[in-house]
Each structure stands twice: as structure tokens, then as C-alpha cells.
Image: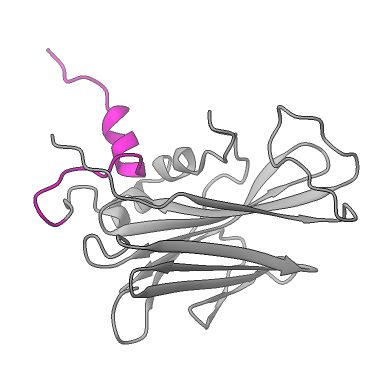
Amino acid sequence: MRIATYGVMLALVVTTGLMGQERPPFPGRPRLPGGTSTMSGEHPASAVALATWVVRAESDGAHRLELLVLWRGQPGWWRGPGSGSGGGSGSTIRWTGQHGGVEVRLELDRATRVAQIQGEQVELGDSNVVLVDDVDALEKVTIAALSRVPREVAPSGAGRPDIDSLILSSPEIMSFLRCEVPLPGGAGVVMGSTCAKAVDGRPPPDR
């Protein structure tokens, strides 16, 4: 299978409660007692979907998923010039990403568990995943479903949260990613995407 690389891998740490000191988001470096931090970022999940995530590093050393949004559109919609920025105050966390001509926006109130997805209010309840369809459409986006994955997040080898392991654990989310769809131009699985990891981790066929 041909592998093509197109992508965006962005992460931003928003630190709170540290009086201006940056706290490392994952183990492996000295930690400051009593502080918490929030890491937000995004990466391609498939040819049709982009993953945006918010992870909380707690003072007890645990790292927990606050919100994962899968934005789905036409194949390759997220290609092109890309940028992202995050921030927050109090219990509110915000993320904005630019991908070609498409802007994705989310805001999460951790206290009320209410999110604003492209300006649309979504009451999360005990869900921590939002599946969004038609992100590149001219009309209003579609909130396709709410879902839930385990909250505990392990660090990846690069020190970022291993969001893909959470996605791979959910058949519902993997179906939403449509890993069978290639990028335009006949390219195969997007290198570094969740779908690529699904292919790499597939058990060998029975002989």
C-alpha cells in the first residue's frame, strides 16, 4: 500500500495554577507540586478526519482526556497551510485551528461539561468524544454522535498524549474515520495518522 505524508501535528500547553511557571505535561521531567496543566493539540486521524484533543495533567500525576473531537469532511480537506492555537481561563479551554480554507473552533467548560463546537452548544454529560461531520461544508456542521473512551491517557514515545490508543480502542470511532478512503490522487493511508497505526498494528493473516 502506498503511504503518503500530509499533515499537521500541533500541541500547546496551557498552564494554570503555577504563577507563570511552565509545568511539563507528561512524566520524565521534574514536576512542580500542586500544579495542573492542560495540553491541547491536533493531528490527522484519517484521509477524511482530523483529531483535536484536550488533555489535563493533574497534580497527582495522572493525565486525563477532557475532550476529543473528530472533524470529518471530504478526503484531504485538512491539507494545506495549517496552524492552531489554544488558551483558557478558569474552567474554560479554547482551541482554534486553521486548515486551508477551513477553521475549526471548540470551547470547553470543564465545570459544566458543556462544549461549543463551531459555535454550537453541546452538552457532554459523561461523554468525552464528539464526532463532527461535514466540517468543510458551507452549511452548518453536523454533530454526528457523542461517545466515550477511557479517560486515562499514557504518554507516547514523543512525550505527547497517546490519543491514538484511545481512538483505536473504540470500534464506533474507527468506523467514523473511514480508514478505507484514500487521499485524493490515489495516495494510501496517511503516514502518522490513526489509520496508519491501525494498519501497522493489524495482526498477520492466518496461514
Instruction: Identify the image quadrant of residue 141.
Output: bottom left
Q: Position of residue 29 (x, y in %)?
A: 75, 29
Number of disc labels = 0
Q: Please state the extent of the stretch shown in magenta in the rendering.
A: 184-207
- Comparing 32 with 162, the one in front is 32
- Comparing 140 with 146, the one in front is 140
Residue at left 28%, top 80%? 137
Please identify the residue farthest to the left as the structure is shown: 186
Q: Position of residue 113 (x, y in %)?
A: 66, 68
Please identify the residue farthest to the top as the structure is shown: 207
Q: Assess whether residue 71 is covered by the magenta stretch.
A: no
Q: Position of residue 119 (x, y in %)?
A: 52, 83
Residue at left 9%, top 49%? 186
Up-down: is 21 above or below 121?
above
Instruction: Identify the image quadrant of residue 124.
Output: bottom right
Please identify the residue farthest to the front as the structure is shown: 81
Instruction: Identify the image quadrant of residue 139.
Output: bottom left
Colouring scheme applied when the structure was drawn:
one colour
Is 19 on the left-hand or right-hand side of 54? Answer: right
Q: Position of residue 129 (x, y in %)?
A: 50, 59
Predominant SS of the magenta segment = loop
Q: Assess whether residue 195 is covered by the magenta stretch.
A: yes
Is 9 on the left-hand or right-hand side of 21? Answer: left
Residue at left 70%, top 53%? 38
Position of the N terminus by quadrant: top left
Position of the C terminus by quadrant: top left
Please identify the residue farthest to the bottom as the structure is shown: 139
Is 180 on the left-hand or right-hand side of 197? Answer: left
Residue at left 33%, top 69%? 100
